[in-house]
Amino acid sequence: MKKTILVIDACVRREESRTKKLLDAALDTVRKEHPDWNLEILHLMDLDLMYWKTETLRERDELLAKKEYDAPVFKYGNQFREADGMIIAAPFWDLSVPAVLKVYIENVSAEGITFGCNEEGLYGLCKAKWMLFLTTRGGIWADSDMEQGSTYMEALCKFFGIDEYACVYADGIDIQELDGEEILREAIDETKTVCSRLCAE
Ligand SMILES: Cc1cc2nc3c(=O)[nH]c(=O)nc-3n(C[C@H](O)[C@H](O)[C@H](O)COP(=O)(O)O)c2cc1C
């Protein structure tokens, strides 16, 4: 079945970014194995995303109260809800993800758009079966409880009702004693394997 994959590129350093190399490997895999699938690619650095301010948040909440879900402000949220799968690429910054990705999340997260609420609490509205998060980290953080990038994306995945979460990371890429290129090569191979598996589901 033809699917739509939403690709969220938060690689701030663009072509210099090593995280972008993982993303390129994932995109190559999807294009090769599912040439008919629709890839919707958002380069976050090229979008005019803005975090909520007092007035813009008030305006958004008024639209939500009126259930005007087709308003332009919900464009990214509606797109996020409808995707069949998601690939997100972001470097590890300040123990988490770059602010531009957080701002994007602010823009998609809205009651009635990407999550709902009933007597039992909040539930996700997103259709995606899986989210693949790709990241590279200067130091080694995989087993640390201070790592707030992948853990944040995994929590969002649950919150938005996306069934499966997978993360491929290249850890320790800036540690001089380690072979950064080899670490990246291994992560690229793993990205291809994991991406292929998710797309086959
Ligand atoms: C603004 C900024 C913040 C960073 N914060 C961390 C950090 O908290 N921990 C860490 O291990 N590396 C940190 N790094 C290093 C990056 O995680 C690492 O260089 C990563 O591979 C960058 O990915 P890129 O090549 O895709 O830009 C930071 C780098 C930058 C530019």
Image (tube, helix red, strand yellow):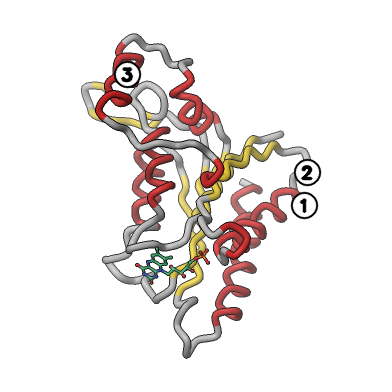
* Image coords of residue 49 (percent x, y): 45, 37
- Residue depth check, mark 2 versus mark 3: number of the one nearer the observer: 3
Residue type, numbered disc 2: Pro
Q: Earlier in the sequence, mark 2 or mark 3?
A: 2
What residue do we see at 45% from left, 83% from top?
175
Q: Nearer the viewer, residue 198 or 140?
A: 140
Tell me which image quadrant ligand 1 sits in.
bottom left
Q: Nearer the viewer, residue 139 or 12?
A: 12
What residue do we see at 42% from left, 33% from top?
108
Q: Which residue is mark 2?
A: 35
- Residue depth check, mark 1 versus mark 3: number of the one nearer the observer: 3
**Whole-Å distance between the Cαs marked 2 and 3?**
41 Å
Q: Nearer the viewer, residue 3 or 46?
A: 46
Q: Which residue is mark 1?
A: 32
Q: Is residue 179 above or below residue 137?
A: below
* Image coords of residue 195 (percent x, y): 61, 55
Residue type, numbered disc 3: Glu
Mark 2 nearby-residue class (10 Å; few <14, some 14–19, many ≥20): few
Residue type, numbered disc 1: Lys
Quadrant where the N terminus is found in the figure: top right
Residue 155 shown left or right of residue 22 in the figure: left
What residue do we see at 58% from left, 40% from top?
6
Image marks 2 and 1: residues in contact by CB distance under 8 Å: yes
Which quadrant of the figure has residue 25? bottom right
Dot 1: element: helix
* Image coords of residue 109 (percent x, y): 37, 33
Dot 3: element: helix
**Whole-Å distance between the Cαs marked 2 and 1?**
6 Å
Which residue in the rendered view is the most extreme toward the bottom?
A: 177
Q: Is residue 9 above or below residue 38?
A: below
Q: Which residue is mark 3?
A: 59
